[in-house]
Amino acid sequence: MECAAGGRRAEDESMGDLLQPWHLIVLAVVAFLLFGAKRLPELGKGLGEGLKGFKEGIKGISDPPAPAPTVQQSSTSVPPANTTETK
């Protein structure tokens, strides 16, 4: 496996340059031109709700289900009615 200068792999170096500030600015301008000013808030809201639902779904999968609360019966019991007949 060949390494780039500095001992890093070529793949690491190319992926590290992906999110430079100028790249993000260009992506924002392209998104603005494609969707317009009215649609961008709607797209952002939909993306945020989708990410929130995804996180909740992942949390539900990774966490074990909470044990069901146990229902305790009241300790005061009513004595059975006297069914014997007295003469």
Image (cartoon, rainbow, N blue to C red):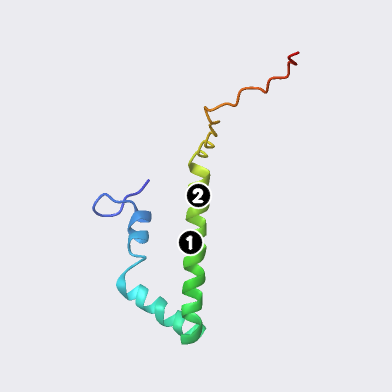
Q: Contact (CB < 8 A) between labels 1 and 2?
A: no
- Residue lying at 60% horizontally and 26% vertically, measured from the top left: 78
Q: Between 70 and 73, which is closer to the camera in this rendering?
A: 73
Quadrant where the C terminus is found in the figure: top right
- Residue lying at 45% horizontally and 83% vertically, measured from the top left: 32
Q: Amino acid at mark 1?
A: Leu
Describe the element under mark 1 as helix, strand or loop.
helix
Q: Position of residue 75 (x, y in %)?
A: 52, 27
Answer few, some or many: residues within 10 Å of disc 2's Cα (few below 14, many 20 plus, some between 14 and 19): few
Q: Residue furthest top?
A: 87
- Residue lying at 31% horizontally and 69% vertically, measured from the top left: 20
Q: Position of residue 35 (x, y in %)?
A: 51, 83
- Residue lying at 51% horizontally and 56% vertically, measured from the top left: 54
Q: Between 36 and 58, which is closer to the camera in this rendering?
A: 58
Residue 51's label in the rendered image is 1
Between disc 1 and disc 2, whose residue precedes? 1
Answer few, some or many: residues within 10 Å of disc 1's Cα (few below 14, many 20 plus, some between 14 and 19): few
Q: Residue furthest left?
A: 6
Q: Amino acid at mark 2?
A: Ile
Compared to residue 15, the image places residue 3 above or below, namely: above
Return the residue at label 2.
58
Q: Position of residue 43 (x, y in %)?
A: 50, 75
Q: What's the CA distance linking mark 1 and mark 2?
A: 10 Å
Compared to residue 11, the image places residue 73 above or below, namely: above
Q: Between 67 and 81, which is closer to the camera in this rendering?
A: 81
Please give left or right for residue 80 compared with residue 16 in the image: right
